[in-house]
Image (spheres, rainbow, N blue to C red):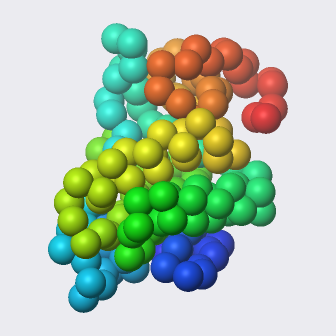
Amino acid sequence: MDQESTELQENGCYVALTTDHLDVQTVMDRVRSPEAGAIVIFAGTTRDNFAGKPVKELQYSAYSKLALRTMMAIAKATLAKHSLKGVAIAHRLGVVPIGEESILIAVSAPHRQAAWRAGEEALEDCKARVEVWKREEFEGEGGIWRANRDGISGQEITELEQAP
């Protein structure tokens, strides 16, 4: 994560926004601990369709300073709630082609049950709260800006309009 990266780290929590490719091993290593018997990692990737329409790519933008603070708050709350050893959340900004990761979330815990639950909760909290927006670019149809949530309808943007 070196092209354009902003990151925060404190007390077992790591969060980052970057325009670079996300690396699963690097994010996993952020939560590795000799006290952890489980590491769960979630990788959100760009799929080639949405609601039957062919997707060309996704484009992510963020209010970075606020998004990092929100991501850190989610990481800290998740760490405390599930007695985790580490939480790492990395979100990619800019263009994310089909098949590439837009978000990685890694959590480590002494036991797998806490890690499974924590990973899913962290993802859902990020989708609901983090100040990141995505534009789905469709093959031959332009694109739609939407909140970074599954299944939420977007608003079509013409070429003359600006992103949020």
Residue depicted at x 27% and y 52%: 116
Q: Position of residue 22 (x, y in %)?
A: 40, 65
Side of 86 where 157 appears, left or right: right
Side of 129 where 39 appears, left or right: left
Side of 105 where 28 appears, left or right: left
Q: Position of residue 122 (x, y in %)?
A: 47, 50
Q: How many marks?
A: 0
Q: Position of residue 137 (x, y in %)?
A: 52, 29
Q: Is 116 rendered above or below residue 140?
A: below
Residue 101 seen in this snapshot:
no
Could you say which is closer to the camera, residue 16 or residue 86?
Answer: 86
Residue depicted at x 48% and y 19%: 151
Residue depicted at x 32% and y 30%: 48
Q: Position of residue 79 (x, y in %)?
A: 48, 65
Quarter the C terminus occupies? top right
Q: Is 35 rendered above or below residue 44?
A: below
Answer with the quarter of the image where residue 51 lies: top left
